[in-house]
Image (spheres, rainbow, N blue to C red):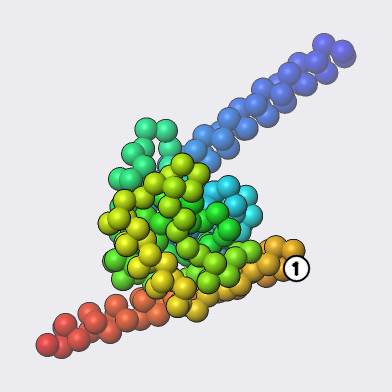
Amino acid sequence: MQRSSSLVSNLLQRQLVHQRQKISKNQMINKVIRSQLPCDVFINHRGNDTKRTIASLLYDHLTRLRINSFLDNKNMKPGDKLFEKIDSAIEECKVGVAVFSPRYCDSYFCLHELALFMESNKKVIPIFCDVKPSELRIVNNNNNISFGPTEIERFNLALEEAKHTVGLDFDSNKGNLSDVVTKAADVVIESLFEIEEAELIRNSIKLIS
């Protein structure tokens, strides 16, 4: 009886391990497939400030809604070239979400991504997290990061455009993360519908003419 019980237990354990491996493999395959698809939404953010809060929560929320989004630590894998991957994702995306935070302007990548959005005339939805638009400015030589004059001009133009774009405000001491993520997702969905509708109208006009 003991031997029979032991055999059943071992069999169940092997089945459980096999099932876990299968699930893990399927998750990996799905992640690779998602990373190859063009993204509808690019989430621009300062990792140290908002990756574990607004940025990741918004990415997960949009993913559950089957909206393909780009977030660096979710879509990039070892061996990817940073600028190549990020630049192509921004080029392919339809909407950008810029999560501004106190240390946003310390990051070359944040500013470079924002400038790409503005230069390619992408729709950008700003979220001002613990920072006011008027507080967004480049401090050269901050944290040993030095920008050249051409870069400063380019980044300042992008920041000025973002400052004068209606966005969402979030105070982490008073606000509810779930609320701002839901609001941001609603704006993203509405924006995607508007872009899709405009594209359909343009295609219809082309067919008529």
Q: Nearer the viewer, residue 165 or 102?
A: 102
The C terminus: image quadrant: bottom left
Image position of 32 with respect to 63: above or below? above
Looking at this view, name the residue that lies furthest to the top.
Answer: 3
Q: Position of residue 204 (x, y in %)?
A: 22, 84
Residue 94 seen from this side: no
Residue 107 percent across, percent down from the top left:
46, 50
Q: Is residue 129 left or right of residue 195?
A: right
Task: Give x and y (percent) for residue 29.
Answer: 46, 40
Q: Secondary structure at mark 1?
A: loop
User: Residue visible at 68% across and 67% down?
Assistant: 171
The residue at the point 32 percent across, 61 percent down is: 154
The residue shown at (58%, 47%) is 48
User: At 83% from the left edge and 18% from the top edge, which residue is drawn?
Assistant: 5
Q: Position of residue 88 (x, y in %)?
A: 30, 52
Quickly name the residue at label 1: 174
**Pointer 1 local density, CA inside 10 Å: few below 14, some 14–19, many at least 20:** few
**Dividing the image into 4 quarters, which one contains the N terminus?**
top right
Question: In the image, is residue 88 above or below residue 73?
Answer: below
